[in-house]
């Protein structure tokens, strides 16, 4: 349970007791879900269904049914006993809620006491027994009774559990109750859920952004399975947003590309409906505010604890921003460092290379302009223009070719995006101020070898001696930074030794990377 935060005066110091009522199909549970999950999430909340859960009840009590009037009522004497029992439970429960509300807690109760009066048959109470109505007048008043109203035909169309005549009777009954009680709010529940939530929060005096209501209440997300650690939530609809969300996944393996193609096909035929459906987890308010009306969001959590990346889309399904988020203090510090690094290298990189464009920075948050990247068929290849372009950082950040310069720190196939205009180098969180001159390009090809299976060990060993296409690329890099290509074998060995000593074996990919480095070192020794 989240403790209240009233420092900005956005909520009252005392909580409130709110009852949500209406016929079956009017949307009581949907409204309660939205209130608890979004509008009141800065307050402690206790939620109940009908009773306040003090006295023991039968195991089946409160369980949803598709035919609430199927069982015949109890005799009058037993109906009276049940009413008294529920009354005692209600009185004790209300007393227990007083301290909780005094501390800022909100109580959300679906149905409540007066549902016994309006629909006694649901509770197997003889309708001829009027005790519930008389005892109800003795109960303390609620702070608010939200009565969900609407056309009986529309309500029955949503949930056809009761005959239309019974729904008409209940709708009329609740309207009469609304006229008799000043704390009652008659809400048109036939509108979209977002409008209902906005209306209710305004009447309750809850500070809430109505522009976000549609996003919070109307959308659902499909959980897409990932082969790596973490999770990925993709909006189930509209399909244009689902398709756009695919750009949050940058595949560099054959299986990853096939998986992306399969997911695109699944979206095309509406197959996201068969995947597990999830509500969006709590997201930072400053990220939520970036979503325009009718827009959507896709979110991925990765291997780093407390870290996630979100893609924000407009109503047409077009990506308008990518937000990198961190919850933990150590991760937030990494993002601050990355933002500063990107602002620095943006002035050092020259076309065809560039860094992501930052739109906003906050504590634990970087918002980027989306990058329209293209899938690479051979991401392990190191193109000549990419290698020479990354050399520009070394040149611009060191006073001479004899000194170390600035390095990316994790220059790898998955951190380079191909665009129509060139290359965008992303993920600068591991940047190195004084990097050995060959480390970036050697890291790129070794990571490709270790985790993508290409280039082969033989190709690498030949390349550091200038052979093959990769050898020509590494030679061009050496010349671009003012170093001799003859230094490549020693730089290659030095990199393998240093990275092997410092590599943390906390993930399968790192264990695999360490094994590949040790194997390459062994092959170097055999070549002597």
Image (cartoon, helix red, strand yellow):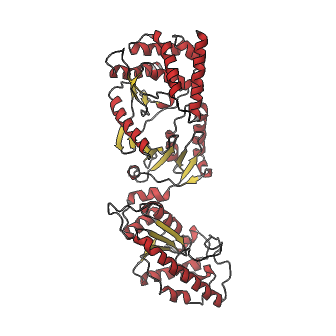
Image coords of residue 40 (percent x, y): 43, 63
Q: In this view, does 483 lie to the left or right of 267?
A: left
Task: Please indicate, yes or no, whether residue 66 appears anywhere in the rendered image.
Answer: yes
| Residue 482 spot, x, y in % from top left | 38, 13
Nearest the eye: 128 or 266: 128
Asked if residue 276 is positioned above or below residue 413 in the image, the reply reads: below
**Is residue 369 in view?**
no
Name the outermost residue toward the right: 71
Please tell me whether residue 444 is drawn above or below residue 101 in the rendered image: above
Q: Nearer the viewer, residue 70 or 388?
A: 388
Is residue 491 toward the left or the right of residue 273 in the image? left
Count of marks, rendered view: 0
Left or right: residue 89 compared with residue 207: right
Where 271 falls versus 399 (above or below)? below
Expressed as whole percent of the image width and height from the top left, the position of residue 465 reads 52, 10
Q: Position of residue 494 (x, y in %)?
A: 49, 18
Residue at screen point 53% across, 40% down = 303
The quarter of the displayed image where residue 231 is located = top right
Above/below status of 218 relative to 458: below
Kindly indicate the quadrant of the structure image that contains residue 508.
Answer: top right
Give me the residue at 47% from left, 31% from top. Answer: 415
Hey, which quadrant is residue 81 in on the image? bottom right
Quadrant into which the C terminus falls: top right
């Amino acid at each position: 349970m989240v403790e209240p935060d009233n420092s900005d005066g956005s909520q009252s110091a005392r909580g409130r007791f709110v009852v949500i009522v209406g016929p079956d199909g009017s949307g009581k549970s949907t409204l309660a879900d939205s209130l608890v999950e979004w509008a009141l999430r800065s307050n402690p909340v206790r939620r109940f269904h009908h009773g306040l859960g003090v006295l023991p009840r039968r195991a089946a009590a409160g369980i949803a049914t598709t035919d609430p009037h199927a069982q015949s009522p109890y005799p009058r004497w037993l109906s009276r006993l049940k009413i008294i029992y529920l009354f005692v439970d209600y009185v004790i429960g209300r007393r227990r809620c007083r301290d909780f509300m005094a501390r800022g807690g909100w109580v959300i109760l679906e149905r409540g006491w007066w549902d016994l009066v309006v629909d006694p048959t649901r509770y197997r109470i003889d309708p001829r027994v009027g005790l519930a109505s008389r005892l109800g007048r003795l109960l303390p008043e609620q702070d608010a009774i939200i009565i969900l109203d609407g056309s009986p035909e529309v309500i029955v169309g949503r949930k056809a559990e009761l005959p239309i005549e019974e729904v008409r009777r209940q709708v009329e009954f609740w309207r009469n109750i609304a006229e008799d009680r000043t704390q009652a709010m008659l809400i048109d529940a036939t509108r979209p859920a977002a409008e209902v939530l906005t209306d209710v929060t305004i009447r309750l005096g809850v500070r809430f952004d109505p522009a976000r209501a549609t996003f919070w209440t109307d959308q659902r997300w499909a959980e897409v399975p990932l082969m790596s650690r973490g999770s990925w939530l993709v909006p189930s609809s509209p399909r244009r947003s689902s398709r756009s969300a695919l750009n949050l996944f940058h595949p560099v393996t054959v299986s990853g590309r096939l998986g992306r193609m399969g997911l695109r096909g699944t979206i095309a035929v509406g197959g996201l409906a068969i995947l597990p459906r999830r509500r969006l987890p709590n997201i930072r308010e400053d990220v939520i505010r970036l979503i325009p009306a009718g827009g959507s969001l896709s979110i991925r959590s990765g291997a780093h604890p407390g870290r996630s990346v979100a893609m924000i889309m407009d109503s047409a399904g077009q990506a308008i921003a990518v937000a990198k988020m961190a919850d933990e203090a150590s991760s937030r510090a990494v993002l601050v460092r990355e933002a500063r690094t990107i602002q620095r290298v943006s002035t050092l990189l020259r076309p065809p290379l560039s860094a992501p464009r930052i739109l906003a920075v906050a504590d634990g948050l970087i918002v980027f302009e989306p990058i329209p990247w293209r899938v690479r068929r051979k991401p392990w290849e190191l193109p000549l223009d990419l290698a020479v372009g990354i050399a520009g950082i070394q040149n611009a950040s060191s006073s001479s070719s004899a000194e170390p310069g600035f390095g990316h720190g994790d220059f790898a196939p998955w951190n380079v995006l191909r665009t129509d205009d060139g290359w965008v180098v992303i993920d600068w969180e591991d940047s190195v101020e004084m990097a050995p001159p060959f480390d970036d390009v050697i890291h790129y090809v070794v990571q490709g070898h270790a985790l993508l299976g290409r280039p082969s060990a033989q190709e690498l060993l030949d390349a550091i001696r200038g052979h093959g296409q990769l050898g020509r690329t590494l030679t061009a890099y050496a010349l671009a930074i003012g170093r001799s290509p003859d230094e490549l074998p020693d730089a290659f060995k030095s990199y393998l030794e240093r990275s092997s000593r410092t590599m943390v074996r906390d993930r399968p990919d790192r264990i695999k990377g360490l094994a590949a480095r040790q194997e390459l070192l062994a092959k170097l020794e055999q070549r002597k």
